[in-house]
Image (cartoon, rainbow, N blue to C red):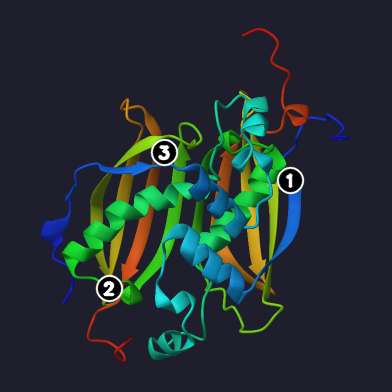
Amino acid sequence: MTDRISEPLAVGDVVADQTYWITREHLVRYAGASGDFNPIHWNDRVAEAVGLPGVLAHGMLTMALAGRLLTDWTGDPAAVIEYGVRFARPVVVPDDDTGIAVRVAASVTAVRDDGVVALEINVRAGEQKVLTQARALARPPAADGPVESDA
Amino acid sequence: MPIAPSVVGWTYPAQPYEVSREKVREFAEAIGDPNPVYVETSAARERGHTDVVAPPTFAMIPVMRGVDMLMDDLGVEFARVVHVDQRFTYARAIAVGDRLETTTTLDQVRQVAGNDLLTIRSDVRDDRGEGVCESLATLLVRPEDEGEPGD
């Protein structure tokens, strides 16, 4: 169901832009799925005792959401060759039903001769950048990449 | 007490991790990712995989096995640890049925403003010895005598 026009990708193109919501329920689920039971991700008492502004999202959960943006774009996790982030600011998750919005946008910083695309990923909670130096190398979806005919 | 520089170079024997279908499903659900390649064999096959594959940051699960051992040996509790940055380089996607072997090495220890900054490298291979993924993590460890006790 792709109606993407197969124009070549150019530096500066925003290939994906999405907002994800993180609630306390997500933190509990992520803790169980990942095996990261650090109490600062679910226990207000502990978070406060160690001087944090509140219960924080796992950095790896925020990284996973930004990663999801990449794999939504490529369609295939195997198309992601390299992916790295710096956890610049904590994402404080309130104890309510709404949670906190994390906005993720990926833009092209380079297109290599072999078709691999370098991406810069902008990850914000409100006005704050929560991940910095978020970068990936990925093979673009077929419609965006060079057509490979002879292998 | 800061972490002694003599621990730099510590390497742990490869830790096994077998990737199960249900863990991959649970992880994909926890990050809210509905991509069928994480749950349906047929969808994964359409992408050229032999079976269901895992989201890119699933790699942190086998990686944590070795990191946990290292932290245990250094006497570091997780409430003192802050994940500073994380990078993965993928040779291929992790797939259901993979019997992964992860070798963990403490590459570097630096003291910054009274904290220890650890660079930890994890080499994730399959049971044929083929590289699957490399992880490079920086963890900040706060000194144990600072602040109130966490629990």
Label 3 neighbour load within 10 Å: few <14, some 14-19, many 20+: many
Q: For this view, does A141 lie left or right of residue A51?
A: right
In terms of depth relative to the viewer, which is nearer, B44 or A72? B44
Residue B29 image offset from top left, x and y in percent: 61, 55
Q: Secondary structure at mark 2?
A: loop
Residue placed furthest toward the front: B22
Residue placed furthest toward the top: A150
Examine the rendered structure and indicate whether residue A47 appears above or below residue A31. below
Q: Which residue bears the numbered disc 3?
A: B133
Q: CA distance from mark 2 to mark 3?
A: 26 Å
Give the residue displayed 51% in from the left and 35% down from the top: B93
Q: CA distance from mark 2 to mark 1?
A: 43 Å
Q: Which mark is residue B138?
A: none
Q: Secondary structure at mark 3?
A: strand
Report the chain holding disc 3: B
Quadrant of residue B52 within the rendered picture: top right
Which amino acid, by three-letter code, is at mark 2? Glu
Q: Which residue bears the numbered disc 1?
A: A12
Give the residue displayed 26% in from the left and 77% down from the top: B114
In terms of depth relative to the viewer, which is nearer, B146 or A120? B146
Q: Secondary structure at mark 1?
A: loop
Examine the rendered structure and indicate whether residue B136 appears above or below residue A111. below
